[in-house]
Image (cartoon, grey):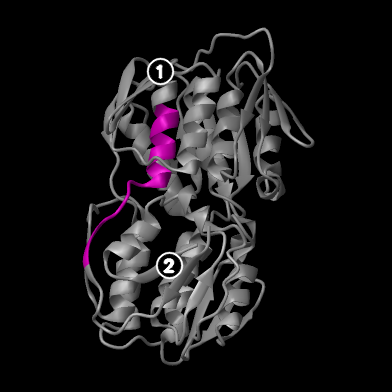
Amino acid sequence: MKVIIKPSNRGDLRGIVSIPPSKSLTHRAIILASLAKGRSEIINPLRSDDTLCTLKACQKLGVATQSHGDTLAIVGTSGRFIPKKSPIHIDCGDSGTTMRFITAVSSLHPSKIFLSGSKRLRERPMEELIEKLHILGVHIANKSHLTISGGGIRGGKLKISGSKSSQYISALLLISPFAQNDVELNVAHLSSSPYVDMTIDLMRLFGVDVEKKGNTYFVKSTSHYKAHKYTVEGDYSSASYFLAVKALTKSDVTVTNLNANSVQGDRVFIEILQKMGKDKLHGIHIDLGNNPDLVPIVSVLSAFAKGTTTIHNIAHLKFKESDRMKSIQENLRRMGIRVSQTENSLTIIGGQPKGSIIDTFHDHRIAMSFAVAALSASGETTIPNAQVVKKSYPNFWDDLKNIGVNIEFL
């Protein structure tokens, strides 16, 4: 699918946008409910390409689920899976979260598990997680797909780097209650730490406490997940696009379904907007090491801001759905904006972006961010491969149209 967006006049857009449920929270709730004892209910889960990959993976592992309207019921396994005679094949699609979390969960399964995914997913780093699971007693072969022979984990002390992905730490924490011995996880260079905090918060809701001392996390092997009724709140990462629309076009757009007290790290986007200026955007220096999903939309706002913006501590962007350092630069340059990078930062000189043909690099956040740019660019903007938004925000284009954006679908 391709979309063509014509720029909007200042103040023309108006409407209410109900932000979809959190992708990150939905992934974690599905995993925890699958590992808990008893029947859990997840209210208002996000139904997107990524979260459906996690749900289908859990079903393949033997988890019973049932969907009724806005409620997803999951009968947990207590971490004890029924062995199957033949290997279990699971396609993780393009979901890095699914691949990393299900790799860990598969370590508890007595059957042989084959995990595959898209070409880009196979390029994304897994080595650190695989190495730590090896130490815990799990055999994993990493070739064209992952072959996992687990049946349980030993526990003990582990040292791990979180510089490439915080999902390694979340994955190990999620399965730690099922270890034979207590787990002590020492983490160095943790990026995106709010996502680990999110994991710990949900583990607590499902009955397991994680103790943290400095950079070390402790989980008791005697702890157990219990069934829970959990309502998924709105996604601050998804909200950032419409909050940016409001700031950029000075339009009467209201964003709903957000929790002001959310554990989501990307709620910091509201503070970023305030820092960039309410009436007229200006360049800033900002560290987004904990908020990689905000870098594309902050880069877009910076393209319209007066002065220079530098975004620091973002080397791990190269390991996302695309190499986002490259993706952002390429598309900003197509729109006539000067941008440069170091190993760990992007510097953007604000100006007046012009309409262009955007390369999404098959990345949902690139597509959505540059759709926002199109609203205030000079001239129309074309975005091919627009269906990539289904990964996290299936109704994104409809929500844009409903607030008055001049958008054509081809």
Residue furthest right in the image: 143
Q: Residue at x 60, y 24 (%)?
A: 106
| Mark 1: secondary structure | loop
Quarter location, residue 307? bottom left
Q: Is residue 174 left or right of residue 144?
A: left
Residue underneath mark 1: 76
Residue 186 seen by the camera: no
From the viewer's side, name the closer residue of 75 and 206: 75
| Mark 2: secondary structure | strand
Residue 115 versus residue 164 in the image, above or below: above
- The percent position of residue 394, horizontal first and vertical second, equals 41, 50
Dot 1 amino acid type:
Gly
Q: CA distance from mark 2 to mark 1?
A: 44 Å
Q: Residue at x 39, y 77 (%)?
A: 375
From the viewer's side, name the closer residue of 163 and 78: 78
Residue underneath mark 2: 408
- The percent position of residue 226, horizontal first and vertical second, equals 33, 20
Quarter location, residue 25? top left
Sooner in the amino-acid sequence: mark 2 or mark 1: 1
Q: Which mark is residue 132?
A: none
Residue 33 versus residue 388 in the image, above or below: above
Q: Residue at x 62, y 54 (%)?
A: 164
- The percent position of residue 288, horizontal first and vertical second, equals 47, 67
Residue interval drawn in magenta: 15-32
Within the magenta stretch, is there residue 14?
Answer: no
Dot 2 amino acid type:
Glu
Residue 156 versus residue 62 in the image, above or below: below
Q: Residue at x 41, y 28 (%)?
A: 32
